[in-house]
Image: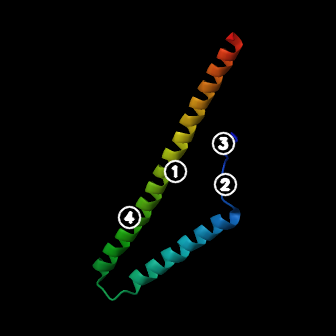
Amino acid sequence: MHPDNPVVRNTHAWTMFTIGAFLVAAFMMGAGILFMEASFSSKGFHAMAALMLVHTTVSITKTLRDNEESKRLINRIEDAKTERLLMEVNKAA
């Protein structure tokens, strides 16, 4: 762990809260679609749209997180190269 780039981890309580909030929201959306006064095909359309919305939300979240992690790795590699170069310069001096 680099002092300028500490690892930030979520607590177990926060993780459980977010999972619980997702489950409650999914249940409420499902119940809303189920009890909606509309035709079966209309309910199916809304259910597919809701599932696609959840899927794309997870996908974009993962993509953004992966991009941030790759930037951190590139920065660590650059820092290591700089440190090695400075050590070589100090040895030569």
* Mark closer to the observer (1, 3): 3
Furthest-front residue in this view: 93
| First of labels 1, 4 by sequence position | 4
Amino acid type of the residue tagged 1 in the rendering: Arg
Q: Are marks 4 and 2 in contact (CB under 8 Å)?
A: no
Pointers 4 and 3 in contact (CB under 8 A)?
Answer: no
Mark 3 vs mark 2, foreground winner is 3
Residue found at x 63% / y 70%: 17
3D distance between C-alphas at marks 1 and 4: 20 Å
Q: Quadrant of residue 86?
A: top right
Q: Are marks 1 and 2 in contact (CB under 8 Å)?
A: no
Nearest to the observer: residue 32 or residue 21: 21
The residue under label 2 is which amino acid type?
Arg
Which of the numbered marks, if any, corresponds to residue 9? 2
If you read the primary sequence from the N terminus, does the residue marked by circle 3 or circle 2 appear first?
3
User: For the C terminus, which image quadrant?
Assistant: top right
Q: Nearer the viewer, mark 4 or mark 3?
A: 3
Mark nearer the N terminus (1 vs 2): 2
Residue underneath mark 1: 65
Look at mark 3 in the image and give the residue it sits on.
Answer: 4
Given the image, on which type of amino acid does mark 3 rest?
Answer: Asp
